[in-house]
Amino acid sequence: MFRPLRVFADVPSLRALLPLSLIARIHLSALPVALSFLVADWTDSYTIVGAVSGGMAVAQAVAGPVRGRVADRGSATRLLLLTGVGYAIGLVLLVAAVAVLPSWAWPVAVLISFLTGLAMPPISQISRAMWPRLAEGAKRESIYTLEATGYEIVEMGGPMLSAGVVTLVSPGAAIGMCAFLGAVGSVVLGLVMRSAGLDTTPKPAATAAGSADKPARQRTLLRDAGFTRAVLVSFFLMGSLFAVNLSVVAWGRDIGHAEAGAGLVALWSVGSALGGVVIAGRGGRSNVTLRIGLLAVGMAALALLLPPVADATPYWLLVPVMVLGGTAIAPSLAASNSRVGQVAPEDRRAEAFGWLATATTGGVALAQPLSGWLLDTFGPAVAVGCGAAMACLAAIIASTLHRPKPAEEPEPAAVSEVDTGAQG
């Protein structure tokens, strides 16, 4: 079971960077819980909760590519420091606004939330842009899979941590915790990157010399058809995942056992973690089309067991379907992220993963209202079926992407050479 962890021995810099990058992101899954309690207690309106949360999500989507370009052209450590501090200040201001303003002043909270989202530390995109600099080929695939698997675990732990602080102290304290974790995590990760020689992105020789190709390299990455298709894969993939999450939670609420739906979502994440560990242990290059296709099959199987298709499916039957279906999540996300890293220019990978962040946020923005309408109109089976259709579309688009041949991605001769090159 420890075979997937061999990549840590092969790539020494990864021992600190991967765990730190995951821990530094725990605030991302903890914040929505704390924010929901804070705003709901203040306004007694979940519509306003959605507006405040949506303001932050929109800002993240807008700022993603911009933060990526800044990271590619300058110091990632400096960017992480500035955004980490700005993010913490924004969350503190949000708690203060809720404490002193009347509930009818909620648009102020939306504005603060939007500005805070603009300062969200770009830890995910900087980390994912960094992995191809540490390893190539199968080792790089294993890193992306381990990252996706680890993030599934972090996503499960964040809400529990936040809910515990809300229960024991207050929603404001939980948001303060998120501010602290976001700021400290960003600063520490940035300092470790600097010590590893990964603070700045190496520039291609032609670009550094100011060649005639420079204007072309300044064009938006979306003008590259291959890159755009790779980003669209993540757009539909993330939309499909959120469609299932929302539908299963709604199913549990409809039957009068909300904890049943939450339990199934947790089991889905457990399956994802298990699938990620197995795939990382196998090594080899990923088949993104196959992995997403298997995810779509799992979603379709789940749809057949939910109302109105099936009104009395026993809970014990849903459990293995969720666990087995979930085993394709982390491998699918890892393969999708790796493919973005492959098609993006070496000196613009942080920007590329910024566009990926925008795409995944957009996928969620598409899935939530669409799934909600399908749930109200038809039921969870149709909403999950829509998620399966989005996963199928992601798989179809993925099948059009160029898959590098082994000769195009040689394994590093030795990890020490990779590290030495990074130090330069």
Image (tube, helix red, strand yellow):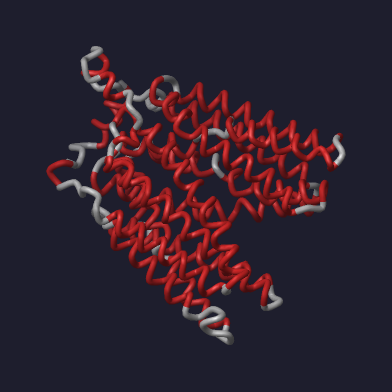
Q: Could you tell whether 119 is left or right of 405 in the image?
A: right
The residue lying toward the viewer, choosing from 252 and 92, is 252
Q: Could you tell whether 182 is left or right of 16 in the image?
A: right
| Residue 422 screen position, x and y as percent | 31, 27
Q: Is residue 222 above or below residue 330?
A: above
Q: Could you tell whether 138 is left or right of 360 in the image?
A: left
The residue lying toward the viewer, choosing from 300 and 87, is 300
What residue is shown at x 34% (from left), y 36% (from top)?
222
What residue is shown at x 48% (from left), y 43% (from top)?
19
Looking at the image, the residue that sits furthest to the left is 407
Q: Is residue 407 above or below residue 395?
A: above
| Residue 55 screen position, x and y as percent | 63, 40
Q: Quadrant of the N terminus?
A: bottom left
What residue is shown at x 39% (from left), y 67% (from top)?
296
The residue lying toward the viewer, choosing from 400 and 131, is 400
Quarter location, residue 412: top left
| Residue 38 screen position, x and y as percent | 77, 46
Q: Is residue 250 above or below residue 61?
A: below
Looking at the image, the residue that sits furthest to the top is 209
| Residue 108 screen position, x and y as percent | 75, 34
How many marks overall?
Answer: 0
Q: Quadrant of the C terminus?
A: top left
